[in-house]
Image: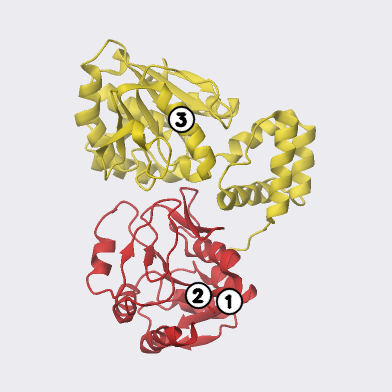
Chain colours: A yellow, B red
Amino acid sequence: MIRYEIGIVETRNVIKTILDTYGYDFRDYALTSFKRRLEQIIMNNGFKDADGLASRLASSKEYFEQFLHEITPETTEMFRDPSLWRNIRDEIIPDIMKGSPKPKLWVAAFDSGEELFSLAIMLKEAGVLTEVQLYASAMSEKAIDKIKNGKIDAKEIEVNEANYVRYSGKRKFSDYYVIDNGQIVLDSNLIRDVNFIKLNTVYDSIPGGIKLILFRNQMIYYNQLLMDKVLLQLSNSVVPGGYLIIGVKETLENTNSINKFTVHNDSEKIYKKKTT
Amino acid sequence: MYKAVIIGGSAGSFQVITRILHSLPPTFPLPVLLSLHRLKHIRSGFVEALSIKAGIPIVEPFDKDQIKPGRAYLAPANYHMYIELGNKIALSTEESVNHSRPSIDLSFTTAAQVYREKLIGIILSGANRDGAYGLKKIKDLGGLTIVQDPIECQVKTMTEASLKLTKVDYVLSTQEIIKFLQNIKTTTP
């Protein structure tokens, strides 16, 4: 592993270029992972250095769209943490479906499709896919297009298969995709009615009245300040009695939103919004 | 003088880690960061198994946990573990490196950038080359580097890759690593 490395000053310079040119604010992203992603982008695109990346960003809106896609880490696998997905299927969904019709469910993390398709498959197998309204957020049009086409990383297919078995799904995982030119293509009918929302880094225009928010492994890319800011938005979006699910190694402790939720399941990091 | 110890290991390292942790006194003056290859989909059991005989508490940290002396931090399953400025843990789900998540290279590299010459890096038995680059990074930034003697490693690939890439400070047996760590307390005010 020989890597190209940039410094903190260069990282801040790229962030400033983006903020000044496009108004997207990455200043409160976690430094180490953000710097690492910039290094990756510089290497993958053959930029000379951080200044090369910054000047390309400043001069090409089209490249900026591409950058927004590249800066967002891919969701690692489908049905990541199968025990969580079993819990959602067996406890959370039945509870949500008891309430008012067409409950709203939102994949709020910047997902590369795996989280959304996992949710859709689960709902389909529970026979309620058409009884809910799904929302998914993304930072770039490119990400939305990619998800809509159902294309996921073929390298991970064995992991996805194994997770689906551990989740104990009703069918075979291979029922949900075809292989097209060596590329895995998921059945896009599953997400036909999903409402895609393009968001910037601070989640400034979000849907309301949500019953379930999936926001897993996104706050790990934030610093404390941004965590608090975005959590405040999300906690306003979810209805009393609704659920917020974060990554198994994230926590609401030490955030200013902790008193708005009760811990519903500690090991799976499922929180429930208080009713008062 | 030192601020942290970071240990990387893979196949064949479990017994060694267990012995090292067992030997550490509760008053051990530094945090111990553990970046060990493990099954991605098994979240529980590992930290419990390591804890049975350990002399210091072992935790699988949450993202943004503050790093404290006298504790061991085990990289959680299926996450990379970075060390962030401000002496904090940062977790990541970015792509695997060297087929590994956690990747030892990433833990070591980020720790080296934060602790620089105040870091001790140790590479143990393992079956791939992950960690070799990270150990070099520690050395380049002035830290102290130790590799388990390949002669006693169950699998030599990782230690040999490290030795090939870096002129390390010490090549030690498990018993010597233990003695080295136990003596740290006497050199720390």
Q: Give the amino acid at mark 3.
A: Leu
Q: Position of residue A106 (x, y in %)?
A: 40, 24
The quadrant in which the C terminus of chain A is found is: top left
Give residue B173's quadrant in the image. Answer: bottom left
The residue where tag 3 is placed is: A232
Q: Are marks 1 and 3 in contact (CB under 8 Å)?
A: no
Q: Position of residue A237 (x, y in %)?
A: 42, 22
Give residue A167's quadrant in the image. Answer: top left
Disc sitting over residue B121 in the figure: 2
Q: Position of residue B129 (x, y in %)?
A: 49, 69
The subunit letter for the residue under badge 1 reads: B
Q: Position of residue A251 (x, y in %)?
A: 37, 44
Disc 1 and disc 2 on one polypeptide chain: yes
Q: Are marks 1 and 2 in contact (CB under 8 Å)?
A: yes
Disc sitting over residue B143 in the figure: 1
Secondary structure type for disc 3: helix
Q: For mark 3, does the 10 Å Cα neighbourhood hold few (<14), some (14 to 19), or many (20 or more) residues?
A: some
Disc 1 and disc 3 on one polypeptide chain: no
The earlier-in-sequence mark between 1 and 2 is 2
The answer to whether residue A113 is left or right of residue A141 is: left
Q: Quick one: A142 or B34, which is closer to the camera?
A: B34
Q: Give the amino acid at mark 1.
A: Gly
Residue for point 23% across, 18% down: A97
Residue B114, compared with residue A132, is above or below; it is below
- Inspect this view and state whether residue A188 appears: no
Secondary structure type for disc 2: strand
The answer to whether residue B110 is left or right of residue A180 is: right
Between the residue at mark 1 and the residue at mark 2, the CA separation in whole angstroms equals 7 Å
Q: For mark 1, does the 10 Å Cα neighbourhood hold few (<14), some (14 to 19), or many (20 or more) residues?
A: many
Q: Quick one: A131 or A127, which is closer to the camera?
A: A131
